[in-house]
Amino acid sequence: MAQVFHKSFNTLSRVSLFGAVFFAAGGLWLMGAVNRSPYMTGVGEAVDQPVPFSHAHHVGGLGLDCRYCHTSVEEAASAGIPSTKTCMTCHSMVWSDAPLLEPVRTSWRDDSSIGWVRVHDLPDFAYFDHSIHVAKGVGCVECHGPIDRMPLTWRQNTLNMEWCLGCHRDPGPHLRPPSKVFDVHWKPEDEGLERSELMRKLIAEQGVHPSTNCSVCHR
């Protein structure tokens, strides 16, 4: 019987099969890269807000403690968004006529909420509790980054599951004395101990044994 296909088709078939494998692998790698990119995660991108609130000014410049605005961070899952009353405590006297703050004054007059846009917005299927992380000595800057240097707020970390698991599997480098959780300038050297020794001390004192069980975050 006459040969229908030329022998070169054998080589072409092998190249096609191997090429398909590499193409599929490359496609998966590309999808992963896109999923981790700032375009998808929002890392490093300042979020537009109704009022351009500056943490650099309020925290870095004026030295306000995180808990002044985020009042429930030590007792509740949510850190809390400050009410207009909190803003007006100062701005009824300071910059009281600034056009930039008109949305705040309108909110105060109309007893309406300011439409703040969440920067760190977890999906509904993921649960995060601020209070337990604060109690165990996880500093605000570990998740939120150098918030005292942000003129406009951006997301410092991806909030992807692999990022959370990285901390749960090795919590030591992210811990500090609970009294220093809200201190944006704290450094491990401040404790007068080697970093490794300090990590072991904090893990033991705070009983830090984070679980990696799915049900911890996916309830």
Image (spheres, rainbow, N blue to C red):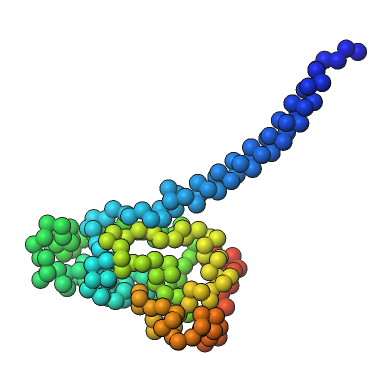
Instruction: Please give the name of the residue rendered at 40% of the width and 61% of the height, measured from the top-left corner.
Output: 156
* Position above or below: 198 against 4: below
Which image quadrant: the N terminus?
Answer: top right
Which residue corresponds to the image point at 68% horizontal and 35% vertical from the top-left? 20
Choose top left, top right, bottom left or bottom right for residue 104: bottom left
Whole-percent x and y of residue 48? 28, 53
Given the current orientation, which residue lies at the most extreme left position?
97
Q: Is residue 171 visible?
A: yes
Q: Position of residue 164 (x, y in %)?
A: 52, 65
Res 72 visible: no
Determine the residue positioned at 43% across, 67% down.
143
Residue 156 position (above or below residue 133): above
Q: Nearer the viewer, residue 51 or 195?
A: 195
Give x and y (percent) for residue 16. Answer: 71, 30
Position of 96 with respect to 19 (left or right) is left
Instruction: Answer left or right for 84 relative to 30.
Output: left
From the viewer's side, name the closer residue of 39 and 126.
Answer: 39
Please indicate whether residue 23 sits to the left or right of residue 79 in the image.
right
